[in-house]
Amino acid sequence: MIRKEAVESRHLKIENYQTDLAIIGGGMSGVCAAITAARQGIKVVLVQDRPVLGGNASSEVRLWILGATSHMGNNNRWSREGGVIDELLVENTYRNPEGNPVILDMILLDKVKQEPNITLLLNTAVYEVHKSNSDTIESVKALCSQNSTTYIIHAPLFCDASGDGVVGFLSGAAFRMGAETPDEFNEPMAPDASYGELLGHSLYFYTKDVGKPVKFTAPAFALDVQKEIPRYKSFNAKEHGCKLWWVEHGGRMDTVHDTEQIKWELWKVIYGVWDYIKNSGNFPEAENYTLEWVGTVPGKRESRRFEGDYILSQADLIEQKLHDDAVAYGGWSIDLHPADGVFSDRSPCNQWHSKGIFQIPYRSLYSKNVKNLFLAGRIISVSHVAFGGTRVMGTCAYVAQAAAMAAAWCVKNNKLPAQLYQEGHMPALQQLLFRSGQYIPNVAWADREDLLSTANVNTSSNLQFKGFDRTDAIFKPLSIAAAQMLPLKPGQIPAINALLKADEPTTLDVELRISARDGGFTPDTTLAAKTIELQAGEQEIDIDFNVTIDKEQYVFVCFLINEKVQLAYAQQRLTGLLSVFNGVNKAVSNNGKQVAPEGSGVDTFEFWCPQRRPEGHNIALQFKQPIHVFSADHLKNGLDRPTVQPNAWVAELTDAAPVIEVNWKEAQTIGKIDLVFDTDADHPMESVLMTHPETVMPFCVRNYHIEDEQGKVVYRKRDNYQTKDEVVFELPISTKKLRIILEHPSVNVPASLFSLRCYALNQN
C-alpha cells in the first residue's frame, strides 16, 4: 500500500522533454505535420488536448476531410492533396470505405505510433509558454488530465496547429480575429456587420433504425425549432452527421472563450431538432429511429488568424496569383457563413469558387514576430475572406506538411523559419516537398539527385490512344450537357467519331472548348461549334472542328443538351481522361453556373464536373489519328498528377506484361526507388459518413516487381493500393539496369505510372 503523511501542499508529477520540433494540436494538421517531420529524421513531440487524433475529422466531431476537390463540385480536376494527407485518405478508403469515424481514429493513431521519431501526448493541454527573449519561445508547459502529469517541452522550433492558436496567443504572436474592412486588402467580398465577422461552431448527431418503435422525450432545455429556427423545414429524418453542417452557432460570440456556451446552445438545437422529427407527426418514417450519438465537442470553424510575413487575401485566390515561395495550394470556395448561423434567415453559406487552385506562400506559415514559431492549419496568415477558402481540413493538412518540412530543414541547417525564405532556400524546400508527394502548381521541379535523370528509359509499349473501346457500350440520355476531356499536344485537333442513338430526326450541337487560363479546367472559351443533323436510330457521327492549338492543354468536346439523344459511353477507364457534366451539385452551391454579383471580384462561369463511380464513364469517342500523350518521358518530369497533360506513362492493354526498362552506361548504387501510381486524385475520398464504391482506385497498379540486370527480382509488391510505394533497400544494390514489370489493374484499365525515381541513398 501507499501511505503519505499530511503536508501543506504537493505538486503534480513533472516530466521534461527536449525535442527538435514541438507540434501543438493533434487535428489533421498536427498529425500530418508530425508524420512529415518525423520521416525527415527529426524528433517530434505531438501534443493533443483530446483523447483521440483528428480534430474535426475524429469520432468526437465527425466532419469529413475535404480540400480542393470540394465534393467533385468545382472545376479543380485532379486536385486532391498529396503527401501524408493523401496517404491517410487512401488508407482510410481502403480500410474504411463505409466512413466509420471510429475506424478513422484507429488509422490516425496507428500511423502516428508507427513513427519512432514521434512522442505522442494525448489528453494534454498547453497552458503556459516560456520565452528565452521577447521573440523566441524556449518551452511550453502542458497538463495531462488523465495522468496528473505536467509536461515541460523544450525545442528550438514550435508549430502551432491547435486551431485556436494557443501557443501563438500565449507567446504574444500578432493575430487577428474577425473580418477586415473591404478597403484593407481591396476585398469586395469582405462582409458587413449585418452578415457578421466570424463563422460559428457546429455539432452533429447520428441516428439509427433499431427495427421497432422508439419514443423520445426531449430534455427541458431543448428548443422549439419550429419557433426558433427559420429553416426548420429543411430538417428531415434521413439526414444526419455532417450533412447538417449548417446547424451552426456562435459567430457573434467569442469563438475561443465562449465555446462551452456555444456548445450548450447547439445542444438545445440538436435535441429540439430530434424532438421535432420524432414528435411533430411530420416524419412517420422516423418511428423506429433512435439517437445513436450526439457530439460533445463542437467543430470550430474560425477563431484567431496569426500574422506572418504575407497575408493571403481575396485576389490571391480568385486571380490565382503566383508566389516565388509557393509551398502548397488550396481550391475550396471562398466559403463564408452568416454569423447568426442556424438562427439566420439568410442562406447558410455564401460560396464563391475560383477558376482553379491557388498557391499558398511559405511566408504565411510562420509568425512575423515570434521567430521560432510555425503556423499550421486554419490559423495561418490570411484575411477573413481568404480564410473562407483555406480553412478546410484537406488544405489545412497540406499546409501543415509544408510547415513541417520547412521545420525539418531548419533543424538540420540551424535556421529560423523566416531565414529559409530570406536567404533564398525556397528551391530546396520545394524539392523536398515534391519528393514527399506534394504538388505545387506552377512550380517546375528537376531533382538533380534522381539517378533516372541520367538514364535511358524504354518501355515495352506506350498507349497510342485511338479512342475508347465500344464493346459493351452504355447509352445514356443527353439530359445534361456532357463533355469528354482530351489531353492534346500543339497541332491540329484530330477528327472525332461519336456513337449515339436518336429517338427521332433531330439536331445535335457540339462545341470544342478550352480553358482561357493556362492549366485550368474551366471550359470557358469556345474554339468551334457544329450543328449536326441526326436520323432516328443508332448511328456514328464524324466531327472535324478543323482547329489548331498552339500549346499542350486539355480540350473539351462538349455535347449540349438534347433529350432525344443518347450518347455511347465506354467501360474502359484511363489515367488522365475524364468525362465532365454541366450538372448541379448542391453540396457545394453548384447550380451548373456561378453567377457572380457585380463588383464582387469573383468570376462568372459554368461548372463542368465529373460523376462519381460507378458512373463517370468516358464518352466513347474514337479518332482517325492516335493521340500520343502517354510516353515514358512523363516518368521523369517530376509531376505526379495530370496538369496540362496526363503526366503519366500508360501501357497498351494488349501488352500482357508491361515493362519499364531503365539503363545506365555505368553501374549505379541504388538505395531507394520511389514509384507513384494513380489513385485518382480527382476523387475527394471524404473520410467519414459517405460510402465509397471501391476500396482501391481502378487505375492503381496492384502487382509489380523489379529486376536487376541479371534478371534477379530485387523487390516484389502484391496488392498495392497506395499512391506512393517507397522501396528502400536494406543493402543498396549495384546495377546498370532495372526492369519494372507491372500487371494491368483490370481488363478495362491499362497499367500506368506517374513517376519513377531512383536515389543512391535514402533521400527524404
Image (cartoon, rainbow, N blue to C red):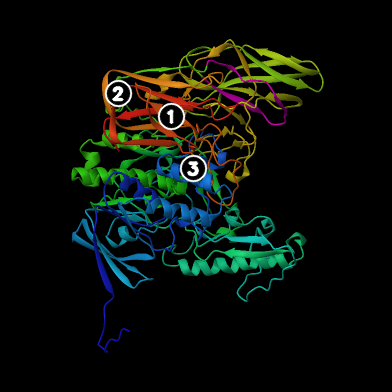
Dots 1, 3 in contact, CB < 8 A? no
Residue with the mark numbered 2: 735
Residue in view at x 52 percent, y 49 percent: 687
Count residues near mark 2 (Cα–Cα under 10 Å), then give few for <14, some for 14-19, many for 20+: some
Question: What residue sits 46% from the left and 52% below the top?
Answer: 107
Q: Amino acid at mark 2?
A: Thr
User: For residue 469: magenta?
Assistant: yes
Residue 36 vs residue 603: left or right?
Answer: left
Query: What residue is rendered at 33% in x and 69% in y?
Result: 143
Q: CA distance from mark 2 to mark 3?
A: 33 Å
The earlier-in-sequence mark between 1 and 3 is 3
Residue 298, position in %: x, y? 50, 62
Tell me whether circle 2 and circle 3 mark residues in contact (CB < 8 Å). Answer: no
The answer to which of marks 2 and 1 sits earlier in the sequence is 1
Quadrant of the image containing the C terminus: top left
| Amino acid at pointer 3 | Val
Numbered tag placed on residue 705 in the rendering: 1
Label 1 amino acid? His
Dot in front, 2 or 3: 2
Residue 122: x, y in percent? 38, 62
Give the distance between the C-alpha atoms of the residues marked 2 and 1, in whole angstroms. Answer: 16 Å
* Residue at the (30%, 23%) spot, across then down: 735
- Measured in 3D between alpha carbons, the distance from the residue under mark 1 to the one under mark 3, in whole angstroms, is 22 Å
Q: Is residue 235 magenta?
A: no
User: Badge 1: how crowded within 10 Å, few (<14), some, or many (20+)?
Assistant: some
Q: Quadrant of residue 597?
A: top right
Decide if residue 105 is on the left or right side of residue 452: right
Instruction: Please provide the residue range marked out in magenta.
Output: 464-487
Q: Can residue 430 be seen from the camera position used here? A: yes
User: Is residue 195 among the parts visible in the rendering?
Assistant: no
Residue for badge 3 = 90
Which label number is shown at residue 761? none
